[in-house]
Amino acid sequence: MADLQLAENRAPTVAQAGVWLACIECEETFAPFAEVIYRCGECGGLLEARYDHYPDFTEFSGRGVWRYAAALPFETGVSLPEGDTPLHEVPGLCAELDLPALRVKHEGMNPTGSFKDRGMTVGVEVAKAVGVSRLACASTGNTSAALAAYGARAGLETLVLLPTGKVAAGKLAQAALHGARVLEVEDNFDTCLDIVSDLADRDEAYLLNSLNPFRLEGQKTIGFEIVERFLDDYGTLPDRICLPVGNAGNTAALYKAFRELVESGAIEAKEMPKLTGIQTEGAAPLVEAIENGSEAITRWGSVETKATAIRIGNPVNAPKALPGIRETGGTAISVSDEAVTNAQRALAEEGIGVEPASAASLAGLRKLREQGIVSSDERVVCLTTGHLLKDPAAAASAGSDPEPVAGDTESVLEHLAE
Ligand SMILES: *Cc1c(COP(=O)(O)O)cnc(C)c1O
Ligand SMILES: [Zn+2]
């Protein structure tokens, strides 16, 4: 296995509270809150947060994202509160897939209905520390919902850029009601992100896409929760985590969580769960890179899928996520939109309501079982990233149609007898 160390911990001279930013390409370090930076000033590489201390389990207390404050840049943040999501048992799916130790972690149970809240509670706190007045993001929907809510809570102005007609109704409604300024762009998500990045470079707004390394700090707490819960329930870690991939921020964040736990001595490197990224066939640039064994992503200019949350052709966090998938022995595969809808129904039969992108994790696992890549004795966690109500149209069309009936009991009984 390759070198899993969090690189030599070289603190910059102006480190604050034991945290700094480091470039994952050239290892240059930067002070985190003195100036606003999103990429390495030397080489343009992605940045990640580094600490002078990585905590083990004994240093965690309380609940939710801020239980893991010892592994975060602040003691607490703008909180609604978030995290502490259920890890469901799914007996029906375990039987169907012949996978007795399958669990589903439902991130749709966060305050605004997606895991994006975990990143925002930290990201918006950083924005306050940096002292910016306007927050902005490009979004396929859920990032904008989370940013709007956390920005509102912090009393900061929020601006979101969305691809016209490609954002599910629930998400758009959240951004609107929480008071974000919503700009609809006649182009895809990747173009929205290009524009917001330009605005951020011109100091017009503080960027809170997952390019912002502090978003991923919050999101890594998904990994901590899974590890703690599995150790409690089974005395061991899961063998594999399946998750949908859009910008690949979550994949990168989970990998970072496991590397930090290795660094602190809480777990061993060989215990790290195999990170398994799932995309849909119409938007699968990361799958393509894994299949071709390439170091970098080739941007897909045109993408299409019903799973709008992962309708992304240029996953910005690929340089962090690809090593995570490879070094944990994981993989990445794509599934059809039809398989996604079937998986959405199967989860619903277990009482778990998710939006299409979330169901991709289960659709991918099903395919890997069929291909014999995942064996029956593996302990697997599927991450479901967003709630059913995010995309009411997709849920309604995947479900059964309402049946019209006259307004008296006899008619109802007759109808039921038909
Ligand atoms: C944002 C999002 C994803 C993709 O996550 P990345 O970190 O961008 O890979 C998947 N599912 C849902 C519901 C999302 O909102
Ligand atoms: Zn660099």
Image (cartoon, rainbow, N blue to C red):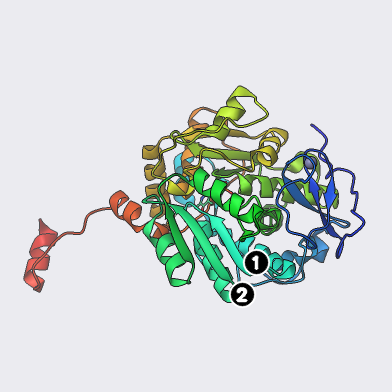
Q: As displayed, is residue 345 above or below residue 179?
A: above
Q: For this view, does 258 lie left or right of residue 370?
A: right
Coordinates of residue 16 in the picture (x, y in percent): 86, 64
Q: Is residue 140 visible?
A: yes
Tell me the distance, in whole angstroms, between the alpha carbons under discs 2 and 1: 8 Å
Amino acid type at circle 1 is Val
Is the CB of mark 2 within 8 Å of ligand 1?
Answer: no
Query: For mark 2, what is the residue?
Result: 154
Q: Which of these two is toward me, 378 or 12?
A: 12
Are the residues at dot 2 and dot 1 in contact (C-beta closer than 8 Å)?
A: yes
Q: Secondary structure at mark 2?
A: helix
Please name the residue shown 11% across and 66% down the image: 413
Q: Is residue 409 left or right of residue 141?
A: left
Q: Position of residue 253 (x, y in %)?
A: 68, 50
Mark before the other along the chain sequence, 2 or 1: 1
Ligand 2 position by quadrant: top right
Q: Give SS at disc 1.
A: helix
In the image, residue 44 above or below residue 38: above
Going by the numbered disc 2, the residue's amino acid type is Ala
Label 2 crowd (10 A; few <14 / some 14-19 / many >=20): some
Residue receiving disc 1: 124
Q: Quadrant of the C terminus?
A: bottom left
Residue 374, percent from left and from top: 57, 33
Q: Quadrant of the N terminus?
A: top right
Give the residue furthest to the top: 292
Q: Which residue is drawn at the image coordinates 29% and 51% (left, top)?
A: 397
Depicted 114 relative to depicted 332: above or below: below
The disc placed on residue 5 is none
